[in-house]
Image (cartoon, rainbow, N blue to C red):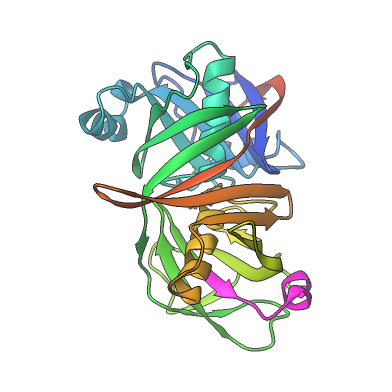
Amino acid sequence: MAFDLRFTKGHGTGNDFVLFSDPEGDVQLTPTQIAAVCDRHFGVGGDGLIRAVRSDRLVDGAAAIAEDPDAAWFMDYWNADGSPSEMCGNGIRVFTRYLIDQGLVALADGEWIPIGTRAGVRRVRELGSGNFEADLGVWRLDGGEPLVRAKNLHAARPGLGIDVGNPHVVVALADDDELDGLDLAYVPILEPEPQAGANVEFVVPAEPLVEAGRGRIRMRVHERGSGETLSCGTGAVASALAVRYWAGEGAPDEWVVQVPGGVVGVRMRTEPDGEHVLLSGPAELVFDGVLSLA
Ligand SMILES: N[C@@H](CCC[C@H](N)C(=O)O)C(=O)O
């Protein structure tokens, strides 16, 4: 039976999403329907699809409420190929702006809102001028150092596995030419291949590498389930963490990450439960529409 899906198109530094609101959890899209919505030729087009649903309507949401009873809203995130992901750093900023825009939440100045995700509860606040900051929680080295091959990269390079709620492998390249020459229409090959797959980021230092106490890098990404995207928030934080790890003691705790779709900020902060990593950047809502879905 066909039904109408009311959606909003949004993006964070060009990482674009189709968002819709389903407070009671009545709309269960299949992976095929999600891929059709995200298709850039036959659908709306997007790197991912985000459903805004009340946490108490979902099994994963119950875990979020147990972690923080105020996590009333759950970001139900799906990649463009219809596979689920635990987290999305650009998505959670756009999601928060969407909740505000829809009148589903109101935030006081500087107030942090807890959002349920499959990776656990994450907190977001508005910075003003359409910018938001998300606390992506405690990060960890995970996934080892797989060898990474990519189209136009002459030899395999070692990557560094980092988990920021979802899995990443970060690879350092020699210079801009190597970064710009990559053909990320082809999926990078990881050896060994992580069981759950990984988002793969390629990074080079920006010029200058450190300015006003902040590290600066350039990044391109191949996202698990979506292909090359113009930006990846969790990928940007994984990249900054990897470069700081490689640089060793004395490296900055604040980073500027240049991605093809713009610039995001990353900072690390020690909390009682470990070191958190925070992501800041724009969140834009572009247009609303209605899609008839089979
Ligand atoms: N674009 C996102 C990450 C989206 C999920 C990712 N493709 C995955 O499968 O983990 C971001 O901004 O973090």
Question: Based on the displayed image, in which of its 4 quarters is residue 45 positioned?
Answer: top right
Q: Residue at x 76, y 73 (%)?
A: 176
- At horizontal 46% and vertical 32% (from top left) the residue drawn is 124
Q: Residue at 48%, 38% (x, y): give it.
A: 134
Quarter occupied by the C terminus: top right
Q: For this rendering, which residue is in front, 88 or 204?
A: 204
Q: Where is residue 12, by image quadrant?
A: top right
Residue 213, image x and y in percent? 58, 58
In the displayed image of the protein, which residue is found farthest to the front? Answer: 212
**Region rendered in magenta:** 170-181
One can see residue 172 in this view: yes
**Residue 201 versus residue 212: which sits nearer the camera?**
212
Measured as percent of width and height from the top left, residue 56 is found at 29, 22
Question: Where does the N terminus fall, quadrant-wise?
Answer: top right
Nearest to the observer: residue 31 or residue 251: 251
Please state the total of marks drawn on the protein image.
0
The answer to whether 184 is drawn above or below residue 64 in the figure is below
At x 34%, y 21%, the residue is 72
Give residue 58's position: percent from left, percent from top.
31, 28
Q: With respect to residue 60, does 99 lie above or below?
A: above
Q: Quadrant of residue 162?
A: bottom left
Residue lying furthest left: 66
**In this view, which residue lies farthest toward the bottom?**
155
Residue 186 seen from this side: no
* Residue 180: percent from left, percent from top: 77, 70
Q: Is residue 115 above or below residue 154?
A: above
| Residue 176 falls inside the magenta stretch | yes
Is residue 279 in the magenta section? no
